Image: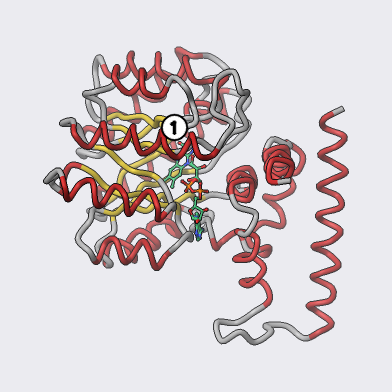
């Protein structure tokens, strides 16, 4: 059942039509719980708030299904504007980018040029840029682009996904590169990825421990308190300095735990997505944890003191609209699979 739900939401995340429609209804459906607005100004406001709590940030300017060079160039320009603003406001913040957004599927050399322009600007401001890891179809190419970029730029890093069998070998090849370790968000074949959650979790712990014993900075990207607690204990037992690693979580998830870790003196970084292209991102979060829907529903219907925000008629209308939306999603997903 869990796999069916996961496949369903991953299917929705890949649906072009729904992605484009979502830009229209977007924030009124509660996307602002996980996405810090649509503009650079809105995301900078969120960063300032978190920085004031001792939390650093990494920003993701959302963009899915980039299919022409104009769109990719616009994405690059937006990222460069962001870098200028981070420097101007002296924020504790770096960037997370996806290579497909910068044209990897269109023309690899063009994508590399876009990345180089971003890294040149970031280097001038001493800002780090992390390349998010996408699905396995882009895996080899992403590592090859990283290798190319590393010849000229040291301020770039990558993500390793513990669901992949090859993660340990790749991590060994990337000893000198700043890495974020995550479990992996895409639906992959059993030929390349562990199907069983227990194996993915065990591999995450093994990879993270290996990195903590090494010399290069590591970001531990998870909301899983079992993993976090075990790694905290491991760092303590092995006298690993706090400045060698940080915990990372996504904006809007487990805020109490985010603050607790920062208060305990661990480096903590919140990954903040922003922009109107939020649908695919949000569907992947529902695929990981359908309970995330509760957060959105609570936000739509209830005030902080658990009172209904709207009158019964409005709530009835919204429920009917949500049901119609789910029905439409299911239908549309079936069409896409045919
Ligand atoms: C900062 C960051 C960056 C990421 N970057 C990438 C990337 O580049 N590429 C990629 O493929 N994936 C990325 N991911 C997604 C990642 O791969 C996982 O899909 C996602 O984080 C879910 O796995 P998890 O380890 O957080 O916890 P899960 O395996 O989803 O959950 C494990 C346990 O943790 C607890 N838990 C989890 N979430 C909650 C919650 N919201 N509230 C209460 N308890 C909870 C529950 O007990 C749950 O059983 C990123 C994740 C983070 C946090």
Quarter holding the C terminus is top right
Percent x, y of residue 78: 45, 40
Tell me: is circle 1 under 8 Å from ligand 1.
Answer: no
Percent x, y of residue 209: 27, 36
**Residue underneath mark 1:** 162
Q: Residues within 10 Å of mark 1 (few under 14, many from 20)?
A: many
Query: In the displayed structure, does residue 131 sit left or right of residue 88?
Result: right
Q: Secondary structure at mark 1?
A: loop
Percent x, y of residue 131: 40, 31
Q: Is residue 39 above or below residue 112?
A: below
Query: At 26% from the left edge and 52% from the top edge, which residue is drawn?
Result: 232
> Which scheme is used to colour this image of the protein?
secondary structure
Query: In the displayed structure, does residue 274 sit left or right of residue 68?
Result: left
Report the front residue among 27 and 53: 53
Query: At 37% from the left edge and 36% from the top edge, which residue is drawn?
Result: 181
Tell me which corner region of the image, top left, top right, bottom left or bottom right, holds residue 80. top left
Report the front residue among 122 and 243: 243
Percent x, y of residue 84: 31, 44
Tell me which corner region of the image, top left, top right, bottom left or bottom right, holds residue 47. bottom left
Q: Is residue 160 above or below residue 20?
A: above
Report the front residue among 215 and 120: 215
């Amino acid at each position: 059942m869990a796999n069916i739900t996961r496949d369903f939401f991953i299917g929705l995340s890949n649906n072009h039509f729904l992605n484009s429609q979502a830009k229209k209804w977007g924030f009124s459906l509660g996307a602002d719980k996980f996405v810090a607005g649509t503009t650079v100004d809105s995301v900078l406001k969120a960063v300032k708030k978190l920085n004031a709590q001792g939390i650093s940030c990494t920003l993701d300017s959302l963009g899915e299904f980039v299919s022409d060079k104009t769109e990719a160039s616009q994405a690059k320009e937006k990222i460069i504007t962001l870098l200028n603003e981070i420097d101007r406001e002296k924020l504790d913040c770096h960037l997370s980018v996806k290579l497909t957004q910068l044209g990897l599927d269109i023309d690899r050399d063009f994508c590399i040029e876009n990345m180089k322009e971003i890294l040149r600007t970031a280097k001038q401001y001493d800002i780090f840029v992390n390349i998010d890891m996408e699905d396995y179809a882009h895996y080899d190419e992403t590592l090859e682009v990283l290798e190319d970029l590393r010849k000229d730029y040291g301020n770039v890093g990558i993500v390793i996904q513990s669901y992949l069998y090859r993660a340990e070998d790749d991590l060994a090849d990337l000893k000198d590169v700043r890495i974020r370790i995550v479990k992996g968000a895409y639906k992959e074949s059993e030929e390349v990825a562990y199907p069983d959650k227990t194996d993915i979790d065990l591999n995450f712990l093994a990879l993270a421990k290996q990195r903590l014993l090494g010399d290069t900075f590591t970001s531990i990207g998870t909301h899983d308190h079992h993993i976090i607690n075990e790694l905290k204990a491991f760092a303590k037992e092995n006298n690993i300095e706090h400045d060698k690693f940080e915990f990372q979580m996504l904006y809007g998830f487990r805020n109490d735990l985010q603050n607790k870790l920062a208060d305990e003196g661990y480096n903590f970084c919140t990954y903040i997505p922003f922009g109107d292209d939020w649908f695919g991102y949000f569907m992947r979060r529902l695929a990981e944890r359908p309970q995330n829907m509760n957060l959105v529903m609570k936000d739509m219907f209830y005030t902080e003191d658990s009172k209904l925000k709207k009158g019964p008629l409005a709530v009835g209308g919204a429920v009917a609209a949500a049901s119609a939306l789910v029905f439409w999603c299911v239908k549309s997903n079936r069409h896409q699979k045919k």
